Image (cartoon, rainbow, N blue to C red):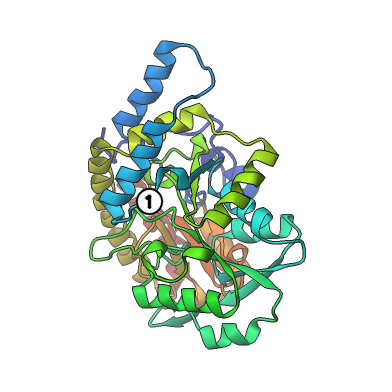
Amino acid sequence: MSFDDIIDRRDTHCLKWDMMEKLYDVPQDKGLAMWVADMDFRPPQVVLDAVQAQVDHGVMGYFGDDSAYRAAIQWWMQTRHGWSLEADHIFTTHGLVNGTALCVDTFTKPGDGVVVFTPVYHAFAKVIKANGRRVVECEMTQDNGRYEMDFDAYDAQMDGSERMVILCSPHNPGGRVWSRAELQAVAAFAKRHELIIVSDEIHHDLVMPGHTHIPMTAIEGIEDRLVMMTATTKTFNIAGSHAGNVIIADPDLRAKFAARMMALGLSPNSFGLFMATAAYSPEGATWVDELVGYLDGNRQLFDTAINAIPGLKSMPLDATYLSWVNFEDTGMTREEFTHRVEKDACIAVNHGPTFGKGGDNWLRFNIATPRARIIEATERLAAAFGDLQ
């Protein structure tokens, strides 16, 4: 299998390709889907073989004895991230949006404030609001085109009703890999305001060469307030398996979360467990290394082409496969530059305002697609904004 293989995902019940016409009015027959954060690549063969083994067996019963699954998670976190964790600290949720919602539900009460650093992954605000909690948007600043957090400003925003902070690490949509000092600052902020920290690290395996992800567990003094979230789904492009992990070291927090899981009658999808167990393996690790190299090539090609178009600028990408592009210098309204991308270039993308404060002049492009499509997308964009040349 090659990452250059073009796989037609249309008419396969694919959200990314089959819904772009309905949601963005981008024609399915000639549109490029660069919005939903899944990849247009098949997962590694070891994952496909695990699914095929279950199909060949033919009996789709309840899953039992998840010790190999938990051991695979432990091995991956230790080997890839230098993080040693206990098997009984792992809870399996139906993906990390579900994991986030469960954390909000378990550790906060209706009316409580939940802090997010915006612009940030739109599902955070969605589940906070759906749980009857208040979204507290702490807008990030920019230094040389990169996001930074301003904790003096955030301290002034707090009114004492906040109970949780959700950190996106690495950051989506800005692609930042946070430094140790920045993570320590988040930890200190949480301690000052007595906040539970939920660290969503779903993109932690997709880090570009020259950058190193630091798990929030590496920061000392926050064990009693830290909830970690990880998953195989982004790393291996198996989002449809809806399997994610909430990992909690503190026994009190763990007991509360376990009780809520029990009350809601939640149990994982067996296919997700089989796939994750297979993915977190030496074969899976080799595939991820090859994937990151390919994504890095896409990143360089996309950034070079975007930054050559007057008025457009992409934020430097430390991690993820999501390029955050600023259209402010075009002098156009948001409606006008979005119209050019969607109607003239026929590309479906995520709209900046959905990511919260600070997103108005931005669009998010998914570059986890065969390189031929990256080339086509950049050529279409250059033509759509050709009058600015």
In percent of width and height, residue 176 lies at 39, 68
In percent of width and height, residue 293 lies at 24, 52
Residue 46 quadrant: top left
Q: Work out whether residue 255 or residue 18 is closer to the camera in this orientation and state it.
A: 255
**Taking 289 as reference, is 354 left or right?**
right
Q: Work out whether residue 253 or residue 48 is closer to the camera in this orientation and state it.
A: 253
**Taking 277 as reference, is 82 left or right?**
left
Which quadrant holds the N terminus?
Answer: top left
| Residue drawn 43% across the image and 67% down it | 386
**Taking 261 as reference, is 269 left or right?**
left
Q: Secondary structure at mark 1?
A: loop
Amino acid type, mark 1: Leu
| Residue drawn 39% across the image and 34% down it | 69
* Residue for badge 1: 85
In percent of width and height, residue 197 lies at 53, 65
In percent of width and height, residue 318 lies at 33, 65
Count of numbered circles on the image: 1
The vertical placement of 227 against 192, above or below, is: above
- State whether residue 387 appears in this view: yes
Residue 130 quadrant: bottom right
The residue furthest front is 251
The vertical placement of 193 against 126, above or below, is: below
- State whether residue 167 appears in this view: no
Q: Work out whether residue 251 or residue 179 is closer to the camera in this orientation and state it.
A: 251
Which quadrant holds the C terminus?
Answer: bottom left
Q: Crowdedness of circle 1 by 10 Å Cα count: few (<14), some, many (20+)?
A: some
